[in-house]
Image: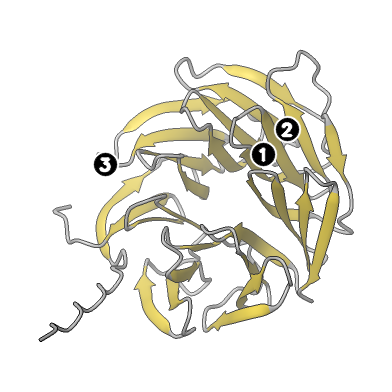
Amino acid sequence: MSFPQPKPEVPQLPQHLIRTIDCQQGAVRAVRFNADGNYLLSCGSDKSLKLWSASRGTLLKTYSGHGYEVLDADGSYDNSQLCSCSSDKTVILWDVATGQVTRKLRGHAGKVNCVQFNEEATVILSGSIDGTVRCWDTRSRKFDPIQILDEAQDGVSSLKVSEHELLTGSVDGRVRRYDLRMGQLHVDFINSPITCVCFSADAQCTLTSSLDSTVRLLDKSTGEMLGEYTGHKMKGYKLDCCLSSKDTHVLSCSEDGHVYCWDLVEGSLTLKLPVGKAVVQSLSFHPSETRLLTAMEGRVQVWGAENHLK
């Protein structure tokens, strides 16, 4: 006699509010987990970047050096460095421990929307409203970019780097995937200004959100559309989308104060998370656990699968 197989566990979703952090840095433009998910970064309209403990919600350090609001940030794999970008047209490399500016990188002709380290933190990639992606060597004494990618016909709103691949989204409605090792460029046309792009964890798919209030899942190698996710509102704001850490769900910010969470395979709405009454500006999913960060106005919310004490 054979026993029935145990039912696969239903993936848990971060639907319980664990804590709210009042960041006290004006409007929070972006919120990001660091590489291991133990810390979070908040980018403020008051020109500051702040580093917090994810588990305790305590402020660890404030990084001041930008001349205008901070729009995006990233942490190096070893947590020793941060990079951030701003409406002041600059990218800053920071020393985490001292809070000092290691480098201030100038060259973009307009505000810099997005920034990320490569996996070894030897290169910073930044995308700007000027339509370029600039690649900066973090160890060089030269302050010029080592490469400029200028294929976009409009501003670059989002970028992600994974091993030897770079994914960019532009207001020109195109998702560009650069194979940096082979020197090849693949382009997919979405026909709406793109607000956010990301790779799936298995690196087989790309996720894009755009101003037609649609999130799309594309097969990376063929460009075939595997899924469309709708119901949220994204008409005028540059808002984030992401995949859950195990690629089971697609999540998106929305202008109606909710985070929408769909089943990746079925495309059905699994969870509509009520964050508040304003626009959900940014979100970030924990790299390995069921944890979600959201940003609304001046606050960051930490969500989990279990109902922790606040």
- In three-dimensional space, the C-alpha distance between marks 1 and 2, rounded to whole angstroms, equals 6 Å
Q: Along the horizontal axis of the image, is 225 left or right of 106?
A: left
Within-10-Å neighbours for mark 1: few <14, some 14–19, many 20+: many
Under mark 2, the amino acid is: Thr
Which residue is the site of mark 2? 90
Residue at mark 3: 55
In the rendered picture of this protein, how many numbered marks are placed on residues? Answer: 3
Residue at label 1? 86
**SS type, badge 3:** loop
Circle nearer the N terminus (2, 3) = 3
Residue 64 drawn above or below residue 301:
above
- Up the image or down, 39 lies above or below 127; here it is above
Q: Distance between the residues labelled 1 and 3?
A: 27 Å
- Residue 87: quadrant of the picture: top right
Give the mark nearer the N terminus: 1 vs 3: 3
Amino acid under label 1?
A: Ser
Q: In the rendered structure, which amino acid carries the disc numbered 3?
A: Ser
Residue 247 visible in the picture: yes
Looking at the picture, does residue 203 appear above or below residue 25?
below
Type of colouring: secondary structure
Q: Of discs 2 and 3, which sits in the foreground?
A: 3
Q: Residue 192: horizontal and vertical position, in percent?
A: 76, 74
Left or right: 35, with 57 as reference point: right
- Report the residue at 83% width, 46% height from top: 132
Question: Pointer 1 and pointer 2: residues touching (CB < 8 Å)?
Answer: yes
Q: Position of residue 297 (x, y in %)?
A: 46, 55
Q: Which residue is drawn at 77% across and 46% down?
A: 128
